[in-house]
Each structure stands twice: as structure tokens, then as C-alpha cells.
Image (tube, rainbow, N blue to C red):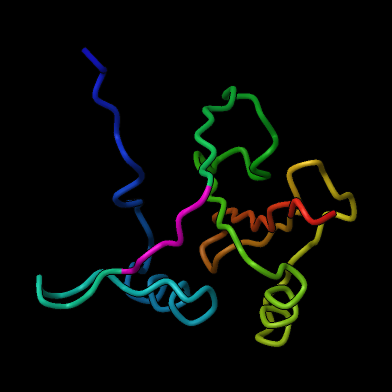
Amino acid sequence: METEKVSGIGGFFFRAHDPGALARWYQQHLGITLTPKSYQDPAWQQEAGPTAFQPFPETSDYFGDANKLWMINFRVRDLDKMAAQLREAGIEIKIDPQTYPNGRFARLHDPEGNPIELWQAATSEG
């Protein structure tokens, strides 16, 4: 008998000082649709693709601020275009100058200081 597995992430929930303002920031700058107010309204739809799920040691400095317990990674089609768009909106973003076998990465923080990583996956075209 095959073991049942989850099919993906159905939601990402976290505490915020100002949930409404933070939700609007994610919608305005990253295009994430707010949670629908009714079952008739559509929810944000992700594009199918790989998802990394990785617990880190408590002592990891990968997220930056040691008080932040999570970091979300969003896939993007064009990292340079997204970075330019964010910078135009006055949002600081740092693109990692190294290209890795699985693609390119950038870091930014939301208005409450939560770390966000953007990932443009490597293409098989070279």
C-alpha cells in the first residue's frame, strides 16, 4: 500500500505587528493575492514547481536576525526584473552575485523585518 503524502503547501501563517498593512505590502510588491473574504472569491494560485522544505539549526545565521524563526523563499521568473521593480519602490534587495547549479538568489525583508529569499531557478537551456 502506497503511503499518503501531502501535495503541497496550502497556506503560510505567521504573526505580524500590523497584519493588514503587511498583507497589502506582499500583495503590492510581490503579487500575492490576499486571502479571500468568501469561498466564492479566488485564492492566490502558485505556479507548479519545486519547493524546498528544510529545518535549519537554531544557531543558523542564514536568516539574518537570530530572532526571526522563519524565512520564506519565493520562485520568480526574472530575478533582475523583480529586483528592479522592488528597488523602484524603495525596497532594499541584495542579489547574490554567485550563480549556483540550481539558480540565482536574492534577499530582502518585509516591513516587519522578516527575511524573504527570491529564487530564479536554473534553466536547462544553459
**In front here: 6 or 30?**
6
Looking at the image, residue 120 sits to the left or right of residue 29; the answer is right
Q: Is residue 103 above or below residue 61?
A: below
**Which quadrant, please, contains the N terminus?**
top left
Looking at the image, residue 112 sits to the left or right of residue 22; the answer is right
- On the image, the x and y values in percent for residue 63 come to 64, 42
Which image quadrant for residue 47?
bottom left
Looking at the image, residue 26 sits to the left or right of residue 8; the answer is right
**In front here: 11 or 120?**
120
- On the image, the x and y values in percent for residue 14 come to 35, 51
Q: Is residue 81 above or below residue 100?
A: below
**Which quadrant, please, contains the C terminus?**
bottom right
- On the image, the x and y values in percent for residue 75 come to 58, 58
- On the image, the x and y values in percent for residue 95 come to 80, 61
Residue found at the very far top of the displayed protein = 1
* Residue 45 forms part of the magenta stretch: yes
Q: Is residue 72 above or below residue 47?
A: above
* Residue 77 forms part of the magenta stretch: no
Q: Residue at x 26, y 69 (%)?
A: 43
Q: Residue at x 70, y 57 (%)?
A: 107
Q: Is residue 96 above or below residue 23?
A: above
Q: Residue at x 65, y 86 (%)?
A: 89
Look at the image and give the residue range highlighted in magenta.
44-49
Looking at the image, residue 16 sits to the left or right of residue 54; the answer is left
What's the magenta bit mostly, secondary-structure-wise? loop
**In front here: 44 or 15?**
44
Residue found at the very far right of the displayed protein = 97
Residue found at the very far left of the displayed protein = 39
Which image quadrant for residue 44?
bottom left
